[in-house]
Image (cartoon, rainbow, N blue to C red):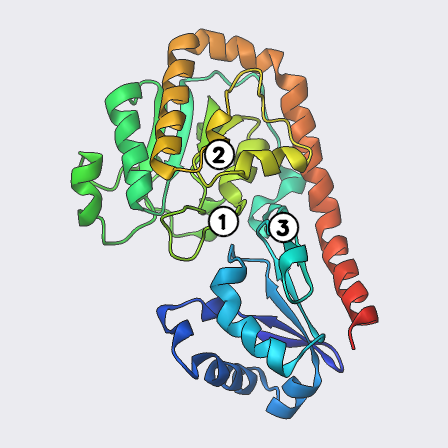
Amino acid sequence: MSCIVCNRPGMLRYGAAHYITDQMHTPGYCEQQIVNDCERSGITTTEFSQSKIVLSFLDEGFGPAEIAPLTNILLQTHPGRFVVLFNVYVDIDALLYPARCFTAWLINRSEYRLDQLLYNFDIALDRKFLCLLRRPTLNRARLARFFLDNIGLDNARLSFGSGAQDGLDQYRDVVGRELPLLVDGVLTDRMREFDVSNTLFHSCLFNIAAETSSQSEANWRSVFLTEKTWKAVMQRQIPIWYGVPGLVEHVRSLGFDTFDDIVDHHYDAIPDETKRHQSVFDQISQLNDQYSLADCQTLRQQLRPRLETNFEQLLEYFRTNRRQVFNAILEFDSYST
């Protein structure tokens, strides 16, 4: 698929997520990449230089720091003539260029098939916690080890590295088990990977959303809401987040119930990553001690109206996200020079 498309004559939409590599800060890399992308997309460099640019990172969680080498170029070549669409929460008023944030954008992934999604509250719970860790990282390896050592697979449905084909040796000693840990096999089919109708995942009350964003990750340091968060809402579960500070606060700001009367999300305000992770571990242990499986079954029924309200809020974003992005582009087009 071309990464530069013509929205209309004089306006190009540029999907540049492929820029984020170790080479991005190499002198001349971004300039050459623009030339290459124009050629690949059938756009002349003259057309590019004369057009307004909608720089879209809606499908990735990169913040201003990660894309700075590219925006610095556009500030010189397209001053006042480009806008950035982020899928992370950033202070856009502090930027030197116009930008908009659409942090609920990934709700609209076609794989979810929300118009066909049904949920049966009569499904019997067989675990308290669901923790799916397909992409292996060191932080997620520590989370998996915590569950294995302190919660146990009788109480948790857990995977680790289930989507990886190799590279798992470096995590084996941290997790303490042969890898990968599989719930439903190695999923290479995209439709299965995002199958929120899988009843196996519905039989847990709490969902540990190990978000992509991490202070230890090279490219994802901002508040970035991915399928880990939205699947918890779709599956009518209570999320506990394992990510960057401020993530829970932002979910609340989007109108979602974070069940603060049940889960103590004070970890969300802890800036130190190690201390924050330990606080998440402590909260999971407390919930495990506080609620038996039968208690979880009862609690889910009691919370049914709130869980359904969360899903309705998600559907509202699903229905309006594309229009909001379209309106943001129209607004930019009307005031840009």
Viewer-nearest of discs 2 and 3: 3
Establish if 162 lies above or below 120. below
Q: Quadrant of residue 96?
A: bottom right
**Label 2 – label 1 distance at C-alpha:** 11 Å
Q: Quadrant of residue 121?
A: top right
Q: Nearer the viewer, residue 221 or 298?
A: 221
Establish if 100 lies above or below 185. below
Say what secondary structure mark 2 lies in: loop
Q: Position of residue 307 (x, y in %)?
A: 63, 24
Q: Is residue 245 rendered to the left or right of residue 331?
A: left
**Label 1 – label 3 distance at C-alpha:** 18 Å
Say what secondary structure mark 3 lies in: helix
Q: Which residue is mark 2?
A: 198
Dot 2 alpha-carbon crowd within 10 angstroms: few under 14, some 14 to 19, many 20 or more:
few
Q: Which residue is mark 3?
A: 105
Quadrant, the C terminus? bottom right
- Find residue 203 and name its label: none
Q: Position of residue 81 (x, y in %)?
A: 71, 76
The reply to whether residue 89 is in sight is yes
The residue type indicated by label 1 comes to Met
Q: In the image, what residue occupies the spot 40% across and 27% down?
A: 280
Q: Is residue 267 rendered to the left or right of residue 281?
A: right
Dot 1 alpha-carbon crowd within 10 angstroms: few under 14, some 14 to 19, many 20 or more:
few
The residue type indicated by label 3 comes to Trp
Establish if 285 lies above or below 166. above
The residue type indicated by label 2 comes to Asn
The reply to whether residue 196 is in sight is no
Q: In the image, what residue occupies the spot 27% across and 53% down?
A: 165
Q: Which residue is mark 1?
A: 191
